[in-house]
Structure formats: structure tokens, C-alpha cells
Image (tube, coloured by chain):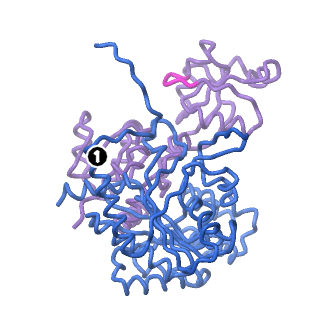
Amino acid sequence: MSAPLTIALPRGALLEPTLDLLDRLEIDTSEVRSNERKLLFAEAGLVTVRPSDVPTYVEHGAADIGVTGKDVLLERPEREVYELLDLGYGECRMVVATRAADDDIVESSLRRLGRVRIATKYPRIAAGYFAETGRQAEIVEVKGSVELAPLAGLADAIVDLTATGRTLVENDLVEREQITVCTARLVANPVAHKLRAQDIDSLIERIREAAQ
Amino acid sequence: MTNRAIHRIPPGTRDVLPDEMRELRALTETLRGSFEDAGYGEVWTPALEYEDVLRTADANAAGAGYRLFDDQGRVLALRSDMTIPIARLVATRYRDAPVPLRLCYFAHAYRAVEERSGQAREFLQGGIELVGSPGPAGDAEVIALVIQALDSAGLGRHRIGIGDGSLYRTLLATFEVPEERHLPLLEFLSRRDLVGLEAEVAKLGLPDTARDLLTRLPTLRGGPEVLGRADGPVAEAVENLRACDELLAERGATDRVIFDLGLVRELGYYTGAVFEVYDPAVGFALGGGGRYDDLIGRFGEPQAACGIALDVQRVHAAQAAEEAIS
């Protein structure tokens, strides 16, 4: 009997639904649920990491498979992991938002200044989207509280992920464009995908059954 | 803290000190011994090639990341693999030599890397090239030799994945998918985004069996039984893989082989079988290769050829892990 697959779980909003999924697959998650500080659960084959670190752990083979948001995968396309399954939960939208009062600031900045200034935690996604839509954008990368950027005058608009839109509303921001919809994805290390093929395939099979 | 100057080296390069060097040297000596015993003579080629030479072989210069000008204004590139220089060497220096020709090498190659990604910019490759031995017979020879060389190096759990780089294209042609729809599908495949691939395939409006095969092919991997599941539309490629399986059985190497119908390699010069080498102790492939029957012909007389390159540092990491568990 080989060791269980090591699974990298995303801390934060995706953790709860991911643990629920593992429960349905009869993988023991009680220790993860009862111990918020602990990061490594060797017996169950689980590690908990930041969602944006999941592809890193999986790419290097420190975890065989992992769960993370599509937003993370879009932002780091050079990470060599297999994207195996859309898990369907954790749905969020990647949007362009501006201040409620600035309803045409993107257009006017482009017209008068030749570019629009975008603050975001997702510089690759933002740059790619504005390039695709034929608009010059100056991307300002921030690490947190992106909502503040247009209010404080750092940027004209933001590109950010939103689930309910509440944070936007609370900061007097309005969604202007939707870039894409992101859900949780199951990813696998390329070597594990070959060497642990049966374990990974049977896990996917069980996830598909559990989803029905 | 003392005020000591830090003289950095470029990210993705490394210094090697005696303890590691002794182990690396012992490892390359073992691998070289296996290759030489099988009749593969060692060659050296320059680290710098004319960029045109690399472009002759591959439109993307095989991903060469570093270019410079010489005193005549000609563009030189640091080689990004050894297969292209050896194809050039075979076409120019072995023009009328009898085949099959068996060559091996241990040399550094260079690729551009993302900073802080942990990837190597300069890496030591050890590999073999078999020229003038077409089809499954040649494929099986290089696969069996690499398996055996890694055995000699003390690895015990390594596997070689075998696929066919043209499989997916053949499948698309069989199902009469229009040419302009191929690129996005192949991009999803090479990015290993099976979710995106499935969505893109669904848009084609094909019958269920075709849709199912296009979606599932990249996940068909395992023993020879997987070959049966793709028999119809890609029979020729599957026939080659099956022949390879039989030849490997004669060499007693089948239990180390994974047939992988989803295997894709980035380099453009592969024409048929493609290989990748794995060990459970290392999260990245230890090496890879394939058949490149059109490559040598771009430099001279056409010759069927195939080869495999190992990343020596990664093999070393696997070797260390193997010692730790035994």
C-alpha cells in the first residue's frame, strides 16, 4: 500500500468548501478543522498553504496535488502543473472597478493621458486584459487593500477578485467590466500525474461522483 | 556584522565545491561508463553556436535565452540543448559515416529562467543520441540504455514515459477539426490545462465518442493496456508504441515504462515518439527526449535519429534520495 497522496489545501475562503469536499471523499479532515495554527498533517497527507503558494508546492512535488483558485493559475501561468478539474465552488469574478463618481474615468484617462492607471494584486491578468482589449494601461502592483487605490488617487481603476461585490460597494466602487469568472481548480504535479496515475485518477473519479 | 562585499552570481547558476563535485563526477563517470559500454562515444561541441544554426533546427532557436555579437557582428547564442549541436556535427563531420552512429555527451546548456523560480539557467546535461536507427527499434534502444544507466547510478524507482508528439494533431485531423481551431487546443494541451481543453473541445460540436477521446487522451497513461483505448483513429502512432513495448519486453525493461498518450514536449523538432524520465523523489522530470527524424536533414543528409538527455543535477538529487531510503 503506497502512502496517501499529499494534498496542498488553500487557507482562506476556499479552505472550508475544500475540507467539505474531502469529507465527502472520506479523507479525515478533523485535525485540520480543529487546529488552525498547524500547517502540516502528515498522517492525512495534507498541508495548508496560501492559495497563491499552492502551485509552487505542487510544481516542486512537495505536494502531489492541490486545490487553488483559477485566479492564482492565471496570474502564474509559468508554473508547470496539470490543471485537472474545475471543482465548481469558490466562484469569484475578476473585474475592473472605479469610483462610483468616476463613471467614464477609464475612457477619459485613455483619451487625454493616453493610458489608464490600474492598481491590482494581479498584474499579469490586468496587463493581459488591457492589452487584449487594445488599451494602454499602466499597472501598479499592490499587495493588499486594492480598494483604497482609486480613493487615495493612486490609480484610476482597480482589477480585483470579488465574490459578493460587498467590499466594492463598501468602498464606493462600482464594477465596470468583468474579465473572467474564477472557481477552485484541482492541480497536480506532472511527475506525480504519471507515477501516481491510479491514485490521482481514482480521486478524480470520486470527486466527480461526489459532485453529482 | 562585518562589512563584507557580496559578489553575486546570476540567479539559476551555481558554484560547485569539492564534496558535491566528487559526487557529481562519480555520477557522470557511472553514466558515461554505461553509455560507452553500449558503444556511445563521447563528444564535445562549443557552448556558443551561430544563432542561425539553432534557428535552422527550430524556429524558436530551441528556447535559447542568451545571445551576443562577435567581433564581426554575427549573432552567437548559448546552446539551450545538445541535440541541435549534435545534429549539426553529424551532418558535417559524419557525412559519409556508416550508421547507426552512437554518440553521448556531458555538457552545460543554458536557458532563460524566471527569477526566484528555482529553475536552473545553466544546467549539466548528460545524454545519448542514436543516429540512423529509425522507428521503434531505435526508440527502444535509447530507452533501455537510459533505464540501465540510471540503475547503475543507484536509482531504483525511476520510470520513463513514452508518448507520441504527433498524436493529438493526428487525432484532430482524423476528426476533421478545422485547421484554425487546432492552435487553441494545442496550447491548452501544452499548458496542461485539461479544464480549458475540455471546454474548448466541447465548443467543436463533435459526436460524443470524438469529444470523449479528445478530452481523455491527455490523461491516458499507464501500462500497455492504455494503447488499446486509442486504437482506431491514431492506429499508426499506437502501432509504433506497441512495437516499442515488445522490443522493450525483450530487453526486460517494460516494468519501468509508462505509456503516456498525453505526453507533449515543448521543442518543435520532434517527429514521433517522445520520452520523459521520472523519479518519485524529484518533482520535475529528470530528463527527456524523443525522435527527430527531420532534424539532421536540415543540416545535410537526412537521417532518422532519437535521443534522451538527463539533467545531471536532478539525477543527483534522486540518487541522494534513494540512498536516504535504502
Q: Colour of chain A?
A: purple
Q: Can you name the residue that lies furthest to the right here?
A: A111
Where residue B281 sits in the image (x, y, percent)? 30, 56
Q: Amino acid at mark 1?
A: Glu
Asked if residue A144 lies in the magenta stretch, the reply is: yes
Placement of B254 over or under A150, stated as above or below = below
**Range shown magenta:** A141-146
Looking at the image, can residue B166 be seen? no
- Quadrant occupied by the C terminus of chain B: bottom left
Q: Main secondary structure of the magenta part?
A: loop
Pick the front one: B170 or B30? B30
Q: Is residue B44 visible?
A: yes
Q: Residues within 10 Å of mark 1 (few under 14, many from 20)?
A: few
**Mark 1 — residue?**
B20
Position of residue B66 measured from the top left corner of the image (x, y, whole percent): 59, 42
Which of the pair B258/B141 is nearer the observer? B141
Residue A147 part of the magenta segment: no
Q: Is residue B272 left or right of residue B148?
A: right
Name the colour assigned to chain B in the rendering.
Answer: blue
User: Residue at 82% across / 22% down in the picture?
Assistant: A111
Residue A38: x percent and y percent? 24, 37
